[in-house]
Image (cartoon, grey):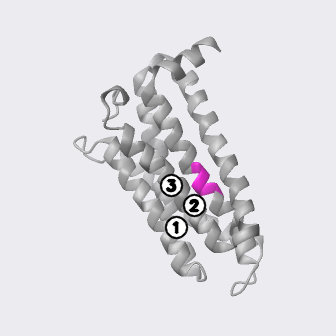
């Protein structure tokens, strides 16, 4: 346990990856927490079984991660993370504009999942490359942060849905992504955060 706190304190790239991951899963959780409630309303008038069917489109995100390894080494992981975060923002814009249609939900789900999975894979690559001999401990730090972000997304998604409805959910989802993206843009260019990150 002592070494875990040591790594948190001494590895800025680990802290940044954990922040990005937390914000990313937070945004993802906002959407999936509320989707069933959204589908129960007009114009859908559907239940959780349709939400389950829509989740199958998230497979595209999982498939996307298998192609990251084929991206040329000249493209840094930081660049991939930036692009992936922008994809997540675009997905939320689509949810806001076309969230009352199945095609809007499907396209948004694909982009949201692609973005999150790409950020997640790059984060883990950066984290594990810093100290391969401590990969389990580093993964513990990263995944705890990751799921704390997801839990906050679930909590906040439920709160804003109850008060502001779908538009509140869309804004919350975008703000989560922006939190991760802004942190990434501010700190990823700083030398101490670049431990094998490119």
Say which residue label 3 marks.
177
Q: Nearer the viewer, residue 46 or 164?
A: 164
In the image, what residue occupies the spot 57% across and 43% down? Answer: 22
Asked whether disc 3 touches disc 1, contact meaning CB atoms under 8 Å apart, the reply is yes
Asked whether disc 3 touches disc 2, contact meaning CB atoms under 8 Å apart, the reply is yes
Asked whether disc 1 touches disc 2, contact meaning CB atoms under 8 Å apart, the reply is yes
Q: The N terminus appears in which quarter of the rendering?
A: top right
Magenta region: which residues?
25-29
Q: Nearer the viewer, residue 41 or 102?
A: 41
Cα distance in 3D space between marks 1 and 2 = 7 Å
In the image, what residue occupies the spot 43% across and 48% down? Answer: 182
Query: Tag 2: Cα neighbours inside 10 Å, few (<14), some, or many (≥20)?
Result: many
* Residue 92 x %, y %: 52, 67
Residue at the extreme bottom: 43
In the image, what residue occupies the spot 59% across and 28% down? Answer: 141
In the image, what residue occupies the spot 44% across and 19% down? Answer: 131
Residue at the extreme top: 2
Element on which disc 2 rests: helix
Say which residue label 2 marks.
173
Asked if residue 36 shows in the view, the reply is: no
Cα distance in 3D space between marks 3 and 2 = 7 Å
**1 or 2: tag closer to the N-terminus:** 1
């Amino acid at each position: 346990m002592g070494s875990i706190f040591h790594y948190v304190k001494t590895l800025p790239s680990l802290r940044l990856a954990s922040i990005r991951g937390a914000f990313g899963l937070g945004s993802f959780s906002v959407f999936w927490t509320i989707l069933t409630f959204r589908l129960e309303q007009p114009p859908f008038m559907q239940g959780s079984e349709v939400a389950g069917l829509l989740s199958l489109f998230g497979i595209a995100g999982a498939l996307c991660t298998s192609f990251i390894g084929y991206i040329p080494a000249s493209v840094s992981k930081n660049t991939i993370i930036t692009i992936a975060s922008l994809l997540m923002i675009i997905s939320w814009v689509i949810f806001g504009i076309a969230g009352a249609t199945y095609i809007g939900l499907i396209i948004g789900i694909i982009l949201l999942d692609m973005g999150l999975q790409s950020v997640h894979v790059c984060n883990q690559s950066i984290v594990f490359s810093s100290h391969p001999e401590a990969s389990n401990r580093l993964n513990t730090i990263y995944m705890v942060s990751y799921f704390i972000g997801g839990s906050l997304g679930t909590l906040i998604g439920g709160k804003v849905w109850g008060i502001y409805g779908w538009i509140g959910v869309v804004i919350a989802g975008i703000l989560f992504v922006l939190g991760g993206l802004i942190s990434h843009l501010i700190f990823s260019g700083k030398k101490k955060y670049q431990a094998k990150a490119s």
